[in-house]
Structures are given as structure tokens and as C-alpha cells.
Image (spheres, grey):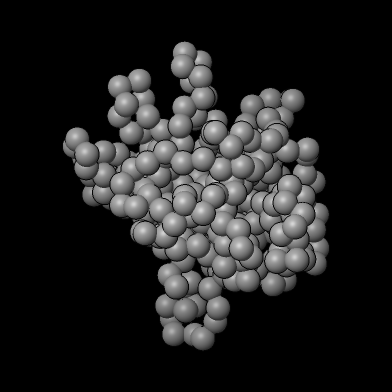
Amino acid sequence: MSPSSSICPLYRLDDKSWPVPIGSGVLLAVGPAHFLLTCAHVLDHLDDPTTGRTSLLSVLNGDLQPFAGTGSVSRMPATGGRERDRVDVTFLRLDDATAAGFRAQFAFWPVEAVALGVEASHDTHYTFMGYPLRDAEPRGKGMLRPQIQKITARSYAEADYHRVGVMPYSHVGIVMDGAPMRDETGNVHQDRPLAPILNGLSGGGVFKGVRRRELGQDVPVELVGLCMELPPEHPQSFLAVRITAALEGIRRRFPELSPFIPETPDVRVVQREPVALSSTL
């Protein structure tokens, strides 16, 4: 199973019912249940002060469709906006019909293939996957061809974690100090800010083992976290929140699924009381 098959693009509709890409999501199977995971700040784009909360859409049964789920989103920090949220996760439990719609084009990553704990999830390189906004825009009426982007780079060193102000127990990051990246026109820009190129990967998946598997090593590919942000303290890096936060949130919200969720050996994620999401999101 390719890890990219478990990453889906997420959309909302504008006031003219035109699809607007807002980020990415990870499809995860936990025992008999099916979830969509993403970052909380991705769903913040659904708040429209004029029309209220708009529908969340993705590609189901080969077409862009709204979908619903029941779950939780990390609470907005009282001290500031979402940029101060160091948890920044959302999980939605999907009903059977919605899960079947996703399976027409995607696949649900098994929770058994998740790496938990600093030691088990350690790798020299990590691969971040998601759908950049620039590659997910509509290409005409009824034409959507979102293109997934994969970025593999060296993992954070201890100094990188200190620079960003997070801990390796709760986050994981990569430093993109290698080859230059191309912008939406295909031109190479060595010193171009990464935000215009990578916006939209938020909520996508972070995996270990991808690079070593490509080099021919017989290692498992495992889900480690969710693409989170390009931290301003370290502009040439990409930060992810570890999957622990989402899994422990699922365990708390849906205790009947706890036997299917692996235990984290070194949980040090401080999780605020989540906000319940309506099943008519």
C-alpha cells in the first residue's frame, strides 16, 4: 500500500459554489472505524462570518462531495490565534457510506502501521505528503485534478527543536536545506519563501522509512504525524505534530476503540480538552 493513497485533498465552497482548496487529510483505519485526520487550522477555513460554517468536501466516489463526521478539534488557545496551538489536530469518525466513498479512490492507512514514541519513530529523513493549494485549484468547470506533493528531507537535530521551541516527544520536523524547489511556473528559486509553494500540505501525512525503502532497504513505511506548519523561527524547515495527539484524542472520545490503538511509550503531549464537532459539519 502506497502511503500517498491515504492522503486526500480537502475543499470548501466559496459564495459562488466554486471549490476552494484548504488543505489535506489523512485517512486512517482504527479497528472497525474509519477516520479522517487533519490539522485544526485547516478546518478554521470553514468559518465564514457571513454564511456560517460551510461544508467540508473531498473526492468521494470519484466526485467532489460534502461529507460529515463526528470527532474533535483542538481548542483555540486563549492566549492567541491558531499559530499558538502546538497540538493543532482534528479527527472525524466517518460513517460507512462516507468511508466507502473515499475507498473508491483512496485507501485507509492501518493504525497498526503507525510509529509511536521517539525511539520507534526515529529516522534520518522523513517524507511529508499533501496537496499544495496551487496544485489543487479547479482547472475549469467540473475539472479537478489535484496533484500530491512529497517532500523528503533530513530530520530535525536537537538544535532545530530548540530553535522552534518544541520537543521531539510531541513534534517532528525536517530541514529543507538541500536542492532548490520549483514554484508553480516550474522555475527554480533557491531563496524563494516556501509558503507559496507548500501551502495546502497542512493536515497531510508524515512517514518514516520512505527514503530508505526507495534505496532498496527492507524497512517498514510507517505514519508518524501530520504536516503542521512552516515555523517562522526556522523558515527552511517543515514541522509536524506527532500522530500521538490524534490517537489519544480518539481513545478518549471513542473509548470502545481503545483496544485497537497502540500505546505510546513516552507520551508527553499536553492535550487540552477538545471541542466536540457536530456530525453535520
Residue 78 percent across, percent down from the top left: 74, 25
Left or right: 149 in relation to 33: left
Residue 235 percent across, percent down from the top left: 52, 43
Nearest the viewer among 183 and 82 is: 82
Which quarter of the image is occupied by the C terminus?
A: top right
Q: Residue at x 51, y 15 (%)?
A: 49
66 lies above or below 30: above
Q: Residue at x 63, y 71 (%)?
A: 112
> Residue 72: in sight, yes or no?
yes
209 lies above or below 224: below
- Would you identify the image quadrant in which residue 280 lies? top right
> How many marks are shown on the rendered structure?
0
Nearest the viewer among 277 and 169 is: 277
- Would you identify the image quadrant in which residue 262 lies? bottom right
> Residue 236: in sight, yes or no?
no
Nearest the viewer among 280 and 20 is: 280
Q: Residue at x 22, y 39 (%)?
A: 142
Which residue is situated farthest in the left direction here? Answer: 140
Residue 153 percent across, percent down from the top left: 49, 62
Q: Residue at x 50, y 62 (%)?
A: 108
Residue 244 percent across, percent down from the top left: 70, 57
